């Protein structure tokens, strides 16, 4: 009974709409000229009449639909970019960082983009900002282990995490996320100086390790060459040579030759 009543009301409403279209056309025929419009390349138009969905136009070129009660929602299907402004978030280790990103997306379902959300551009902008904050908290800023994902390197695991979470968040708007790339990534000003000192200390340690490894190779080669040249040394002389070479090479300072002079005093009574 209820369905029959609804169908009857819907039919009456359709008849009223048709009568209105006919009346306007009869009394003002030039209005038909306003029914022409153009669909541009990589663009779709969602057509409504008196607030009801009619169809989606996808073929580019000139079209005509009676203008009375007509509403056109133009939805571009080109690849578009969204610049997410710099924001401060906490990475996995709890350090505040400043991060911004660029999102590349495309509208694949014009019906959802036009009718299921109020404004699809605002919708993805709001969702992207929230996703960037949430995903950034799952990874550290940088990692000593090169195989471990981090924001600074931005490997495939980090990128796919951003894309998959953002795609899930914007499915209701008919948008396909094509890519997410970090645009700006720095430590927050309040800890930037401390982190810079830490990075300098780590770089110094790595440099010292490299110097020591090279020094050991140089000393080993020097001792081997001396033995091959039949310049035999005692155990004490070899230890002294190794010690002096390591000190000179690892110190990073210019070598200062020192000549050991032994004096023998001879006294007579």
Image: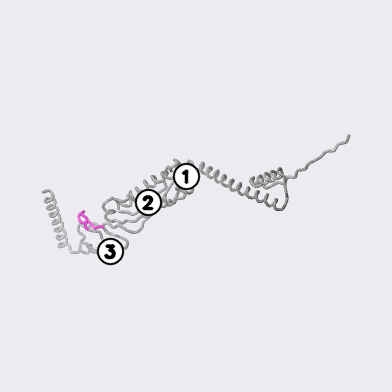
- How many residues crowd around disc 1 within 10 Å: few (fewer than 14), some, or many (20 or more)? many
Q: Nearer the viewer, mark 3 or mark 2?
A: 2
Q: Give the prevailing secondary structure in the magenta stretch.
A: strand
| Residue 48 lies in the magenta-colored region | yes
Instruction: Give the mark, 3 or 1, whose residue is nearer the N terminus.
Output: 3
Q: Compare residues 212 and 166 and report the one nearer the observer.
A: 212
As drawn, the residue found furthest toward the left would be 1
Q: Give how far apart the Cα atoms at labels 2 and 1 are.
A: 23 Å
Which residues, given as a range, are shown in magenta? Answer: 46-54
Residue 73 sits above or below residue 62 on the image: above
Q: Which residue is mark 2?
A: 163
Q: Quadrant of residue 114?
A: bottom left
Instruction: Name the residue that disc number 1 marks.
Output: 187
Tag 3 near tag 1, CB within 8 Å: no
- Determine which residue is flagged by label 3: 59
Instruction: Please identify the quarter of the rendering in which residue 55 is found.
Output: bottom left
Q: Can you give x and y, in whole percent of width and height, for residue 173 in the image? A: 30, 52
């Amino acid at each position: 009974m209820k369905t029959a009543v609804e169908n009857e009301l819907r039919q009456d409403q359709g008849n009223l709409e048709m009568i209105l279209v006919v009346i306007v056309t009869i009394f003002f025929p030039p209005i038909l000229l306003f029914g022409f419009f153009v669909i541009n390349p990589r663009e779709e138009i969602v057509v409504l009449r008196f607030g009801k969905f009619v169809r989606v136009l996808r073929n580019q070129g000139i079209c005509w639909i009676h203008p009375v009660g007509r509403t056109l929602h133009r939805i571009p299907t080109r690849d578009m970019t969204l610049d997410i402004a710099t924001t401060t978030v906490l990475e996995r280790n709890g350090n505040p960082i400043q991060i911004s990103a660029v999102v590349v997306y495309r509208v694949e379902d014009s019906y959802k983009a036009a009718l299921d959300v109020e404004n699809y551009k605002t919708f993805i902008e709001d969702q992207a900002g929230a996703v960037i904050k949430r995903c950034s908290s799952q990874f550290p800023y940088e990692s000593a282990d090169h195989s471990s994902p981090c924001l600074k390197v931005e490997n495939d695991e980090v990128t796919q995490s951003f894309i998959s979470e953002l795609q899930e968040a914007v499915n209701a708007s008919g948008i396909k996320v094509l890519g997410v790339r970090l645009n700006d990534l720095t430590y927050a000003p309040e800890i930037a100086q401390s982190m810079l000192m830490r990075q300098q200390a780590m770089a110094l340690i790595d440099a010292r390790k490299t110097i020591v490894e090279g020094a050991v190779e140089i000393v080993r080669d020097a001792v081997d060459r001396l033995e091959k040249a039949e310049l035999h040394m005692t155990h004490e002389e070899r230890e002294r040579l190794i010690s002096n070479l390591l000190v000179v090479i690892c110190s990073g300072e210019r070598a200062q030759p020192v000549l050991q002079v032994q004096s023998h005093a001879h006294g007579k009574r």
